[in-house]
Image (spheres, coloured by chain):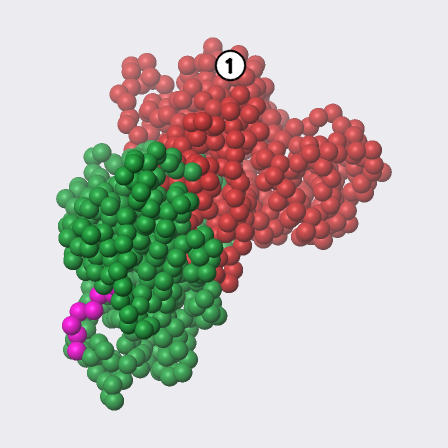
Chain colours: A red, B green
Amino acid sequence: MEPQEDEENEEAMSERIVVIGGGAAGMSAAAKARRVNPGAEITVYEKSGYVSYGACGFPYFIKGDIPRVEALIVRTPEEFARQNIRVFVHHEVLAVDPDARTVRVRALKHGRTFTQPWDRLILAAGGRPSRPPIPGLDLAGVFTLRVPEDALAIKRWLVEERPVHGVIVGGGYIGVEMAEALTAHGVHTTLVEMLPQLLPTFDADMAAHVLDTLTRHGVDVRLEHRVEAFEGRHGRVRAVVAGGRAFPADVVIFSVGVRPSVELAQQAGLRLGPTGAVAVDDHQRTSHPAIWAAGDVAEVHHVVTDKPAYIPLGTTANKQGRVAGTNAAGGEATFKGVMGTAALVVFDLEVARTGLSEREALAHGLQAQSVTITSSAGAHYMPDHPPLHVKLVFEQGTKRLLGAQMVGRTGVAKRVDVVAAALHAGWTTTELAALDLSYHPAVAPVWDPVLVAANVASR
Amino acid sequence: MEPQEDEENEEAMSERIVVIGGGAAGMSAAAKARRVNPGAEITVYEKSGYVSYGACGFPYFIKGDIPRVEALIVRTPEEFARQNIRVFVHHEVLAVDPDARTVRVRALKHGRTFTQPWDRLILAAGGRPSRPPIPGLDLAGVFTLRVPEDALAIKRWLVEERPVHGVIVGGGYIGVEMAEALTAHGVHTTLVEMLPQLLPTFDADMAAHVLDTLTRHGVDVRLEHRVEAFEGRHGRVRAVVAGGRAFPADVVIFSVGVRPSVELAQQAGLRLGPTGAVAVDDHQRTSHPAIWAAGDVAEVHHVVTDKPAYIPLGTTANKQGRVAGTNAAGGEATFKGVMGTAALVVFDLEVARTGLSEREALAHGLQAQSVTITSSAGAHYMPDHPPLHVKLVFEQGTKRLLGAQMVGRTGVAKRVDVVAAALHAGWTTTELAALDLSYHPAVAPVWDPVLVAANVASR
């Protein structure tokens, strides 16, 4: 249990907590605030029709592995109500008045607006898909993927319209996973990416394995193709023009990144950080003493660079939400930051990363170098021991670890976590190489690939 | 590359390195010594007919997953010869003279003995199966499992004699895995264990999952059964008498632990430690300045207890061997010690541990407590998300981590490694809970089970 501070007199009155946004950050904050302060009045406003859902499961729902989108709901508004947390879906917060300590809310179903006072405010407005001004982006059949309504719309389109050709715009996590989902529906899928590689948070050499896998599974990947327009007929998409040619498309997934939804923060005069997201301290407090921010609307402290970063991920949103909720409810909690640990599964490939890629490290002015080794996730003599590629990024001279990227069929994500722990501890490659890691022929060679890479890096 | 010290004058002459034992420790030492000192004369004597083999693969060879035992050989004597390392198999070292700096060797094939001088000696004599004086232990069909010859003999017996009933004596790693191997050959298998639980390095609650799995796969497990005798006819085993009753047995695997083979060390006057194995410092040096020891013959420093321990495992043998080889060859390397990290796969269960079990921690006089949680290796909404049981052991008050045990179908061993890193760093449960671990619905819930357990422990 987090230590619960004696509340000051003024704060003892402050018991109306309003949460803007019912995603992972907002609902974690609300639930944690309730545990810390059983007497507070806690109200959540969510613009969409859903709260507390596992957005990372959308591609599996769309693909068909998960039959109903409701399976992705962690807890319903009714379940929150039993904890005495009032959740209003289809309610959009229009404005925040930080001096009067109120929010202006519109009930989207009937259009009425009302004013709700708060003593402490948690801003968890999330992010939204980037939508640069490309002609035809509003055509029917062109989708972004962010909320359950998006996932439902894409699934319905795939089932009802039976598209033959699909185009994914953007080769990040969502784009790559949606390429698999479309392929599972028998859609001939092209993925167009502006950059010369997929997965920009990975180095090109590691991302190349993902390219191979997509290609092997029939996805037509076009790198260095910038989308110029979407062409349609009768309001429906027909083709995507990219790199000077038209790719036929009856369905398009547009996934070129996420931007923090900072409009309310800006209107309320909250300070934004260098990344453009809401600046927060290690208590998730914004520049206003009674407003906390958490999740995809906020910056995050990067443990390796010791600088603010914008890395919108569900894990971070959950943790920041708990910290914001604790502090807003009068408790005391801090968030140490992230290393940008992330994992991805696409077809038969498991991919993960932590810390800085070599490119990122160089961009931060670090004297970075790297080693890449290929080993396997099991002993060489086992009937099945698929290759495992490990790249370690470290500082020249000091050998301080900066990051890791791994690609394989199995045993990837949780091996990356070992390096995440090493980054958290601030170890060198030599210290990582000294670890007593588990060995069993079915799950690791006697020298775990992490140790092999650390040994090579330590030379 | 380890820093290669300027050799002193006396040491510059010292170029005959003899290695006793060609297992993981001895061959790692020889290979590393060669890299550190290209001019040294390096000679390895191995009593069995094999060097450099993956002993942890024996159960898979016996089961039939690996067709030939030679597949377990990492490198052959011929391959070592190409590195100018002379390897003599079927050669037993009879005596060490630490003053004259010689070993007395017998060539087992023709019985000749000879004397080999050395300047630096690496003792990697390994361990041997415990063989308490139980009547009938020498009957045909009763096997221990240590060297490739043992694995071949067991496999041959299973294939040629087609035993109907088998008894495993001892519920440690080998016993449990061999229960699976015998079952795969259609043998009705009983496992008898003296203690009230399987896997004594685990706590009873976690070991119970392994008991369940064995039972579910048809193995008849008898706990608290002490073996009293083996009964035979015409020199062949017929039954195992344990706990006052006779269990029919046409094949017996006797696996009640490993003892260090310290006879040569004792004869040479090397100091043994409190565990009965050869005492070494962090350079793997014994009490004699020109003799190093590594692998199952030696003690190991336990990072969590800060005391010597005897934990004979292949991973440790490899690492100690490299350190011994480096130092014996005039380089400089240290071994930081182990946490007793170990993994096991039995039927569809993956099991792993690191640090101290709760029982071990209490036995060491630590104020230990624990939390056990059940989560899953993937998001709850995924079609397949088998349960994952996590037990964290930590110190009361300080919350310092002491150990972890995990049981599940997948994603177990490398999650334990995250805690191994945390133990190495000396973290509390709160520090572990702050880690940025990877998340993807196919490989982890948004709160990784390690974080869930750490959060519960931190309350």
**To which residue does mark 1 refer?**
A270
Q: Which residues are magenta?
A: B128-135
Which quadrant is the N terminus of chain B positioned in?
A: top left
Q: What amino acid does circle 1 point to? A: Leu
Q: Position of residue B250 (x, y in %)?
A: 31, 82
| Residue B141 sits in quarter | bottom left
**For residue B232, above or below residue A18:** below
Q: Write the residue at 18% across / 50% down.
A: B99
Q: Position of residue B225 (x, y in %)?
A: 19, 71
Residue found at the very far right of the displayed protein:
A233
Q: Write the residue at 39% across / 32% down.
A: A427
| Residue A200 sits in quarter | top right
Q: Write the residue at 28% across / 70% down.
A: B112
Answer whether residue B134 is magenta in the image. Answer: yes
Q: Main secondary structure of the magenta part?
A: loop
Query: In this orientation, which residue lies closer to the viewer: A83 or B271?
Result: B271
Which quadrant is the C terminus of chain B positioned in?
A: top left
Residue found at the very far top of the displayed protein:
A99
- The local crowd at label 1, few if under 14, some if 14 to 19, many if 20 or more residues have their Cα within 10 Å, is some
